[in-house]
Image (spheres, rainbow, N blue to C red):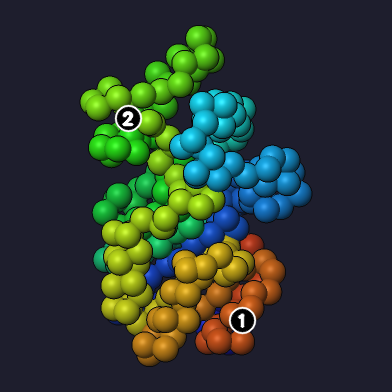
């Protein structure tokens, strides 16, 4: 059997599937990988969390970058890869999607929030760093672009930041615990579009393998974990999953 048929067989025989997604699934929706040529990290020096907290100037620069680069993400639509995973969730065969992405495309493809575990947060809204209150971006954008105002929490006047994890910021405890629980409960883990170099998140696939699950990597480029996987497919995610899962 070819690789797609092998993947179809593995998905068909699994009882509890978990997906682990990285930037590669969203590049097919037109969102650049932060690390790729032209990505944010090649154009800007990262702003570390401590610097964001310590300086109005750094907070202002962070928001300036956010709104200067937001249009691509806001205009992106879920692709066939996202839709294939949504179908598996809808069928009750995929228990969770663990994602390193911050674009919210899994939810927009129809996956309930409760099934998406966002390890690096979400860039489509903001939150207060003191009380956790959620803030929508539209009024923050208007006040910032019109008057240069930095957002403060409407509940407690704390510092408001996009709901993503910055360099130097602690990984969110609850999503990491949930991701570990789902990893240890699955019998098939499928990595989609991750280079598997950002730890501790990249440790979950090997954790699943050590716990007896089968492990698939679908990624355009080789990874350091290819030799550990039961099946490796170096190809585009959307077209491959479309054939394996049966979505357009």
What x and y, as percent, mark residue 84? 44, 60
- Which corner quadrant of the image does residue 2 belong to? bottom right
Q: Is residue 10 above or below residue 180?
A: below
- SS state under label 1: helix
Of 33 and 41, which appears nearest the observer? 41
Closer mark to the observer between disc 1 and disc 2 = 2
Residue occupying the far right of the picture: 37
Judged left or right of residue 61, residue 85 is left
The residue depicted at 42 percent of the width and 67 percent of the height is: 19
**Residue 137 in sight:** yes
Judged left or right of residue 167, residue 118 is left
Of 145 and 110, which appears nearest the observer? 145
- SS state under label 2: loop
What x and y, as percent, mark residue 37? 76, 49
What x and y, as percent, mark residue 96? 33, 64
Q: How many marks?
A: 2
**Residue 248 in sight:** no
Distance of label 1 from label 2 (alpha carbons): 44 Å
Residue matched to label 2: 158
């Amino acid at each position: 059997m070819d690789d797609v048929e092998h993947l179809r067989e593995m998905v068909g025989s699994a009882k509890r599937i978990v997906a682990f997604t990285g930037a590669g699934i969203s590049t097919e929706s037109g969102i650049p990988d932060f690390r790729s040529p032209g990505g944010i990290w090649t154009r800007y020096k990262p702003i570390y969390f401590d610097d964001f907290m310590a300086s109005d100037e750094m907070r202002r620069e962070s928001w300036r970058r956010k709104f200067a680069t937001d249009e691509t993400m806001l205009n992106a639509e879920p692709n066939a890869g996202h839709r294939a995973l949504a179908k598996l969730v809808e069928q009750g065969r995929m228990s969770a999607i663990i994602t390193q992405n911050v674009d919210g495309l899994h939810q927009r493809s129809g996956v309930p929030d409760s099934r998406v575990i966002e390890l690096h947060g979400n860039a489509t809204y903001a939150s207060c760093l003191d009380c956790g209150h959620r803030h929508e971006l539209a009024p923050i954008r208007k006040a910032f672009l019109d008057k240069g105002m930095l957002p403060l929490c409407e509940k407690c006047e704390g510092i408001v930041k996009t709901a993503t994890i910055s360099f130097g910021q602690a990984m969110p405890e609850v999503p990491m615990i949930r991701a570990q629980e789902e990893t240890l409960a699955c019998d098939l883990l499928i990595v989609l579009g991750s280079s598997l170099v950002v730890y501790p998140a990249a440790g979950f696939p090997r954790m699943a393998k050590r716990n007896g699950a089968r492990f698939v990597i679908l990624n355009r480029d080789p990874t350091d974990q290819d030799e550990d996987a039961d099946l490796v497919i170096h190809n585009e995610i959307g077209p491959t999953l479309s054939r394996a899962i049966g979505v357009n």
